[in-house]
Amino acid sequence: MRIMTRKIIIPIAVSITLLLAPCASLAQNTAIPSASGDFQLDLIWKANTLTPYDYPGKALPSTLSGVVIYALANTPNPQKLTYTWIVDDASSNREGPDQTGRGQDSFLLITYQIPEFVHELRVTATDEATGRSASAALKINTIRPEIDFYLKNNDNYNNPAPTLWDTPPGQDSVLMAKIFGFNALNENDLDLKWFLDGQPQENTSADPMVLPINITPRTRLGTQTNLKLLATHKKLRNDINQRAEGRITLYIR
């Protein structure tokens, strides 16, 4: 195994196994609001976590992520309402100041340092002049960061790489990693390391998320190689909940 001209040259077969199923927790993470009261009160939220540039879904929070929740009151003057926020049976966010009061129609939640934790949030909006009020509730799940792999197809990376990648000798392929859920602004906040059969590999590609792979024609049939990508947060290297591994096994046949 050696690396040349931005490619991993594989004289043996390779197989791929994703340690984290692509977006499995993303599909399972649901935040269903409920509401009641004298007027309509809806909740929407946005997490400041990493998603691929072409991902059409919602960014989901991991550990210590910032999540902004907005209360949308269907009244003439929602900014004049008094909002009381309750998070996990506490009157304000443990990680920040009290965000309850007149006109406080948004709330910043800092998620727990525990992955797969379910936050329960409630808000009551009250019109002090008329006594009318409404309440809404929401559950938000935290996820573990994940890595998914895609193969290049006609200049696009929209072909999911199989968990067991069968490929013939002499085949050139380009693999892209797509990363979800890190408490980061972009991939530059991450340290990415590629491994082949447990040995670190230098990726000289211009894009560290992209790995060109060349399997030489002399590769023996029936051999296999394990490919791994380890992603860690540069500023949170000691946080085991801010790291992810993607694994693939290539099998030559």
Image: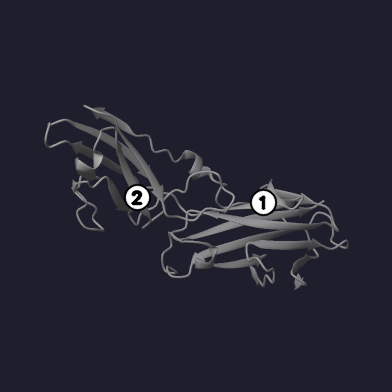
Provide the secondary structure element on which disc 2 rests. Answer: strand
Residue matched to label 1? 150
**Residue 190 in sight:** no
Which residue is depicted at the point 42% across and 54% down?
48
Amino acid found under the numbered disc labelled 1? Tyr
Q: Residues within 10 Å of mark 1 (few under 14, many from 20)?
A: some
Of residues 48 and 149, the one drawn nearer to the viewer in this rendering: 48
Question: Which circle marks residue 241 in the picture?
Answer: none
Question: Which circle marks residue 68 in the picture?
Answer: 2
Q: Which tag is nearer the camera, tag 2 or tag 1?
A: 2
Which residue is depicted at the point 59% across and 50% down?
54
Which picture quadrant has residue 236?
bottom left
Earlier in the chain: of badge 2 and badge 1, it is 2
Of residues 243 and 83, the one drawn nearer to the viewer in this rendering: 83
Residue that sits furthest to the right in the current view: 218
In the image, residue 84 above or below residue 151 = above
**Residue 159 in sight:** yes
> Colour scheme of this structure image?
one colour
Q: Is residue 206 left or right of residue 25?
A: right
Amino acid found under the numbered disc labelled 2? Val
